[in-house]
Image: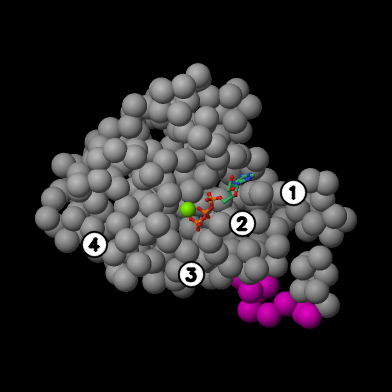
Amino acid sequence: MPAEIITIASLKGGVGKTTTSYALAAAASLGGLKVIAIDLDPTGGLSNALEKAKRTVTIADVLHQRVSLQDALMDHPLGIQTVAAHRSLNEESPSEEQLRRMFDGVLEMCDVMLLDTHPHEPSLVGPMAVADRIVIPTALDILSLRAAALTVGIAQQLEVLERIRGIVVTNVKRPMSRITESLLSGLTLSGLAFETVLWYSSGWILATSGRGDPPGDELLLQSKMLLRELAARPVPVDALRQFISMAQGRRPREARALSH
Ligand SMILES: Nc1ncnc2c1ncn2[C@@H]1O[C@H](COP(=O)(O)OP(=O)(O)OP(=O)(O)O)[C@@H](O)[C@H]1O
Ligand SMILES: [Mg+2]
């Protein structure tokens, strides 16, 4: 069976896309699945974390058919395979067709294909269109939530709304204000979102690379729970539609309240 493609997407930077991608790749790989993680972000956070060494072949070479994805993939000690990112993805956004061509033959070689993305609308279209599952990380501030809602809007335009498996709330600072707390419980109760506590540290990267002590139990547990939750949860299509309307205009009083 071809691999399931999971795209981690948001129009906002710094909301936890790379951390979520890394944690899912590590959890899937430690759970015995064969994982390919593709870094479509020109800043290269995921491929840097996965493998700092070989940089001679990049995703740009694969995109322009100078080399096949299969030949470009490098091995991470944990068993995850990846390819280095390239800054030229700032100027060009791989289309659905280009991605499908890139993945041709390779999807048969793995169980999960993870796509980390660039927070920029044209760059999200291809990766969201090819995805079997879409994960949207967000923080709880108004700009991040609006970006998450706009990202859901892209999925609706692409007619892949039902592929959104979760809006993952990251980076919640505690103690929470009353407003943040009620916002989080509202999002959770509607089935739209759930919180995941992950973190990104050189220790976790070394450990999951087999070059340090085994990853901390708590982080590994959180990552595995996230992977399971994404596989099992139903898609709240109505709540997603309502969430999109939030991005199309929030009443000023609510917007002010949320920004505190
Ligand atoms: N689930 C989480 N829980 C707590 N903190 C998180 C979580 N996910 C990410 N973070 C923290 O948020 C910060 C930004 O994360 P990350 O680099 O993964 O974001 P990003 O969306 O990939 O950013 P960029 O768009 O710049 O690539 C990091 O400091 C990370 O440790
Ligand atoms: Mg990133």
For the residues labelled 1 and 3, say whether their Cβ atoms are less than 8 Å apart.
Answer: no
Question: Which of the labelled discs sits on residue 53, or is there none?
Answer: none
Instruction: Indicate which disc, 3 or 4, sits on the residue closer to the N terminus.
Output: 4
**How many C-alpha atoms fall within 10 Å of the one at disc 2: few (<14), some, or many (≥20)?**
many
Residue type at tag 1? Lys
Q: Quadrant of the C terminus?
A: bottom right
Q: Which residues are magenta?
A: 243-252
Residue in front for this viewpoint, 245 or 202:
202
Residue type at tag 2? Thr
| Colouring | one colour
Which residue bears the numbered disc 1? Answer: 173
Which residue bears the numbered disc 4? Answer: 98
Residue 189 place in picture, x, y as percent: 75, 51
Residue in front for this viewpoint, 48 or 100:
48
Tell me if I can see residue 36 in this picture.
no
Residue type at tag 3? Ile
In the picture, measured across the screen, residue 85 lies left or right of residue 250, that is: left
Between marks 1 and 2, how big is the CA–CA gap?
Answer: 13 Å
Question: Which of the labelled discs sits on residue 154, or is there none?
Answer: 3
Which residue bears the numbered disc 2? Answer: 138
Secondary structure type for disc 2: strand
Mark 4 or 2, closer to the camera: 2
- Most distant residue in the right direction: 178
In the picture, measured across the screen, residue 207 lies left or right of residue 252, that is: left
Between marks 2 and 3, how big is the CA–CA gap?
Answer: 15 Å
Callout 3: CB less than 8 Å from ligand 1: no
